[in-house]
Amino acid sequence: MEKYYLTTAIDYVNGAPHIGHAYEKILTDIISRHYTQRCDDVFFLTGTDEHGIKIQKTAASKGVTPKELCDENSQKFKDAWKALDIDYTKFIRTTDDYHEKAVQNIFNKLLEKGDIYKHSYEGLYCSGCECFLNPKDLTEDGLCPDHQKKPDVVSEENYFFKLTKYKDAIIKHIKEHPDFIMPAFRANEVLNQLEDIQDISVSRAKSNVQWGIDVLNDSDQSIYVWIDALSNYITALGYDTKNNSEDFKKYWPVDVHVIGKDILKFHSIYWPAFLMALDLPLPKHIFAHGWITIDESKMSKSLGNVISPTSVLENFNLEYPDAFRYYMASSAPSGRDGNYSDEDFKEKVNAHLANSMGNLLNRTLSMLVKYFDGEVKPEFKSENPLAKKALGTVQIVKNHFDSFEIAEASQEIIQLVDATNKYVQDNAPWTLAKEEKMVECGQVLTNVLDIMCIISALIYPYCPNIAGDMAKQLSFDLKTKLDDITANSVKIGKLISKEDIKPVFLRVDSELADKSAKK
Ligand code: MSP
């Protein structure tokens, strides 16, 4: 694998980030970190989507300019990602100069090609979706099904994009590439939507939407937000239709766009059509994750149940974001909806990260110190009965990541932890020590520590700090590529002293959790 390029959706900045936005960034960061363990050149793009009627209206209601609102809120997203250790390569803002210019050029290229034309139109516009809705998709009460709001009736002369011209080519692409839309069960949904697809409006009258990028040579029109937003995936690499930058040549086509299921249509129909019109290759994969609910209800301002990711870290006094990252990433099977609850969070991270994984390392190292003064002797290296399972788990985890099954991969890791715990229980090194079978005792402990090196590598994408602390105590190099990992990483000689043993994850305090649950 020479390079891996992956992106998140870029978030609207009419509010602060919530744990739904965080879920996606965490998943993508985990995928990104996993691929750094398989290839040297990973490019991870995220950012904020800053134009459109919704932002214009929010800014007006707050008495600030749209740009002031964008600056303030975009920074909140950056701060949240920092707190969650989201290690992106680049953060794009659609108000960045270079992006705005490139979008104008892209629009013009499509206009010159004849794929964009002018047309008078009356339609139903939902500012939540930032798109025109088909009347047949509305609820019985005439509301947008996603936003439960009545769309505005808009009558304008707009530019239109010939989406219908690309319909057959997109259908063919989806059918010929079963891994284009992932999970695969979503492909049928898209094929159904393609059935009655029409040309789409790709600009709005400036008199109605001022906060947008001007169409070149026609400043009465703003470019439609989705052309603007989707183009971020190529403009961030320096694409501007004329001179293809080195990064663009190197990283495009993207390996995966990670997005929520609600915006799959834009990514698997509109975006491929725009790319075809630009004569550019299509993304390799589009991975649509599910939605996060709170205590089984949809998160919404009106229900007052919107949770900010940093508030979870604060409520539980978490030193690192690792536990939250782990919990979110393992909360739902690939592509399905997941749920956040304080109670469940506390139970799961205490069970998996503290009791099973953290204690295993702590107990094993403590016994190594107690019985052998922290030294691994040459005769402790023996046939390791856990090696086959552990190396098999590395392969299974890789396969899961190739299918964007992040929760499924985490389950495999925990199963390996459980199997290792069982091995310790079954072989009772404390009894072996009591019986003075010291070589056997040392062998059991060393076998466990060798597997813990593999576990630290596998858990690293989810819990980079905990993995770092584990690897440090094991003197294991976390930069080891997954393909180079063996079940024989622990070095012979003094491994650790008593004072250097430190629990890698402390149980989440239940009183704190109860307090935050009552809030
Ligand atoms: N700006 C567009 C995306 C443009 S991408 C070229 C947008 N922004 S958004 O802020 O509404 O959503 C950003 C991402 O967060 C989307 O992928 C969306 O699915 C995801 N989520 C928003 N709420 C969510 C949950 N409650 N749960 C999980 N993800 C959710 O759409």
Image (cartoon, rainbow, N blue to C red):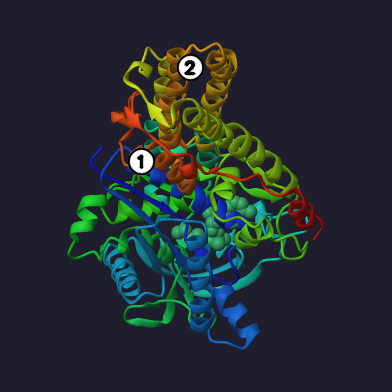
Q: Nearer the viewer, residue 191 or 519?
A: 519
Image quadrant in which you'd find residue 241: bottom left
| Camera sees residue 263 | no
Quarter of the figure that contains the N terminus: top left
Q: Are marks 1 and 2 in contact (CB under 8 Å)?
A: no
Disc marking residue 441:
2
Image quadrant in which you'd find residue 440: top left
Count of marks placed on residues: 2
| Depicted 81 relative to depicted 503: above or below | below
Q: Position of residue 96 (x, y in %)?
A: 37, 74
Type of residue at label 2? Cys
Q: Nearer the viewer, residue 208 or 23?
A: 23
**Circle 2 residues within 10 Å: few <14, some 14–19, many ≥20:** many
At horizontal 67% and vertical 48% (from top left) the residue drawn is 508
Q: Nearer the viewer, residue 5 or 436?
A: 436
Quadrant of picture, ligand 1: bottom right
Please indicate whether residue 30 sits to the left or right of residue 338 in the image.
left
**Circle 1 residues within 10 Å: few <14, some 14–19, many ≥20:** many
Q: Earlier in the sequence, mark 1 or mark 2?
A: 2
Q: Position of residue 29 (x, y in %)?
A: 44, 50
User: Closer to us: mark 1 or mark 2?
Assistant: 2
Type of residue at label 1? Leu
| Depicted 358 relative to depicted 84: above or below | above
| Camera sees residue 127 | yes
Q: Position of residue 179 (x, y in %)?
A: 41, 34
Q: Position of residue 7 (x, y in %)?
A: 40, 53
Tell me the element at label 1: loop
Q: Residue furthest bottom?
A: 63
Tell me the element at label 2: helix
At horizontal 41% and vertical 40% (from top left) the residue drawn is 471
Residue for badge 1: 478
